[in-house]
Amino acid sequence: MPPEGIDSLNADSLKGLVLSLLAKIDDLVEQNKALLARIAELEGRAGKPPKTPTNSSLPPSSGQKANVADASATKRSRKGRPGIARELCANPDVTRDIYAERCACGAQLPAADQVLARAYDHVELPPIKPVTTRINLHRADCPCCGNTITAEPPADMPPGSRSAPASSRSSPIFTAARWSATRAWPRCWRACSA
């Protein structure tokens, strides 16, 4: 109520205004007492040590490690980067154009009216499949001297070798099997062919 309005009040109205103001003052005094008690409680806590796993029920993992600096000091924010993604492959093996067929309202959308909205590469690694080369060494009888001559095996695939040279091995399973017992090879081939 503005101060000018107080002059126009009669005695009964003025008495009601004073009583309502006294009630508000009592409420504010009670709030003030509660706040002063809370301030005193907080000031009393200020001298106490912080809660740690040794003096409270905090789990040990939340405590400060002995040889590690304060986590808040060592924590770095992630470096900001602009919206950069991996470049699209220059020569994809297969390109699929996918068009929207229908709108949410049910209307059909013609492919001729659609423009490219987004492109991404989906990369699939082919399954590893061993390549087995059978070497057939042929023999013949010499027409001049009559000796039996057998063809020489290729240098990169000697007889008894079960794996390719180190430069062509690409799978750890072949490397492990090469150094293991001969019995491991059938298991290796079964695992690769599955």
Image (tube, rainbow, N blue to C red):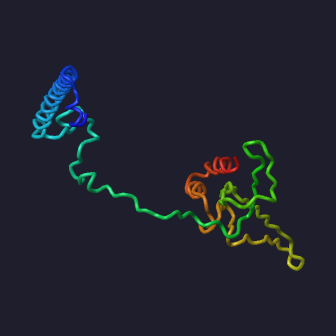
Q: Quadrant of the N terminus?
A: top left
Above or below, 97 relative to 149: above
- At 11% from the left and 34% from the top, the residue drawn is 40
**Residue toward you, 182 or 165:** 165
Q: Given the current orientation, which residue lies at the most extreme bottom position?
A: 144
Horizontally, residue 152 falls left or right of residue 58, namely right
**Residue toward you, 44 or 177:** 44
The percent coordinates of residue 11 (x first, y second) are 18, 22
- At 60% from the left and 69% from the top, the residue drawn is 167
**Residue toward you, 193 or 110:** 110
The percent coordinates of residue 89 (x first, y second) are 65, 67
The percent coordinates of residue 169 (x first, y second) are 62, 63
The percent coordinates of residue 194 (x first, y second) are 69, 46
- At 68% from the left and 72% from the top, the residue drawn is 155
| Residue 3, quarter of the rendered image | top left
Q: Given the current orientation, which residue lies at the most extreme top position?
A: 12
| Residue 21, quarter of the rendered image | top left
